[in-house]
C-alpha cells in the first residue's frame, strides 16, 4: 500500500496524491528562479486536482481562497498534487510565502 501525504489546514484534512478522484487538473510551478505561475486556470467551479512542480528549495507554492489553503514546503522540491474545491465567482491567490512581495498571482473562477 502506497503512503499518501496529508496536509491539515484550517480544520480540513487534504490528501496529496497523484491518484486523487477529482475533476480537471490545474497545473502550476514555482522556481527555478524567482518565478511562480499557474499554467492552467479553471474553466468552472467544482473539485479540481492542483498539481504543482516545485523546482527550487528556497520557494513554495501557496494557494488560498474561499475553502482552500494548500501549500508545498519551503526546503523541498518535486511534484505535489492536491484536491481542491473552487467556488464559482471567487478569487484565489497564490504566492511564494518567503517572497510574497515579488512572487504572486491570482485567478477568479468563472461563474
Image (tube, rainbow, N blue to C red):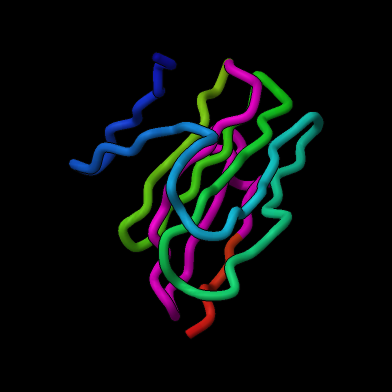
Q: Position of residue 49 (x, y in %)?
A: 52, 50
Residue at 60% over, 42% down:
51
Residue at 62% over, 51% down:
104
Residue at 40% over, 16% down:
3
Q: Is residue 84 left or right of residue 31?
A: left
Q: Residue furthest right?
A: 33
In the depicted structure, whether residue 38 falls above or below residue 77: below
Range covered by the magenta-colored residues? 76-105
Q: Which quadrant of the figure has residue 55?
A: top right
In the depicted structure, whether residue 81 falls above or below residue 5: below
Q: Is residue 18 left or right of residue 67?
A: right
Q: Quadrant of the N terminus?
A: top left
Assess whether residue 102 is covered by the magenta stretch.
yes
Of residues 1 and 67, the one nearer the viewer is 1
Counting the numbered discs, the total is 0
Assess whether residue 94 is covered by the magenta stretch.
yes
Q: Position of residue 48 (x, y in %)?
A: 49, 56
Q: Is residue 58 left or right of residue 65?
A: right
Q: Which quadrant of the figure has residue 70?
A: top left
Residue at 35% over, 27% down:
6
Q: Position of residue 38 (x, y in %)?
A: 67, 54
Amino acid at each position: 500500500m502506497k503512503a499518501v501525504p496529508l496536509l491539515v489546514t484550517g480544520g480540513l484534512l487534504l490528501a496529496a496524491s497523484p491518484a486523487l478522484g477529482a475533476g480537471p487538473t490545474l497545473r502550476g510551478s514555482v522556481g527555478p528562479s524567482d518565478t511562480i505561475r499557474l499554467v492552467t486556470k479553471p474553466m468552472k467551479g467544482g473539485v479540481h486536482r492542483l498539481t504543482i512542480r516545485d523546482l527550487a528549495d528556497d520557494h513554495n507554492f501557496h494557494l488560498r481562497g474561499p475553502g482552500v489553503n494548500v501549500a508545498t514546503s519551503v526546503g523541498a522540491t518535486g511534484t505535489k498534487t492536491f484536491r481542491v474545491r473552487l467556488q464559482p465567482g471567487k478569487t484565489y491567490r497564490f504566492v511564494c510565502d518567503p517572497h510574497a512581495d515579488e512572487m504572486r498571482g491570482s485567478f477568479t473562477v468563472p461563474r
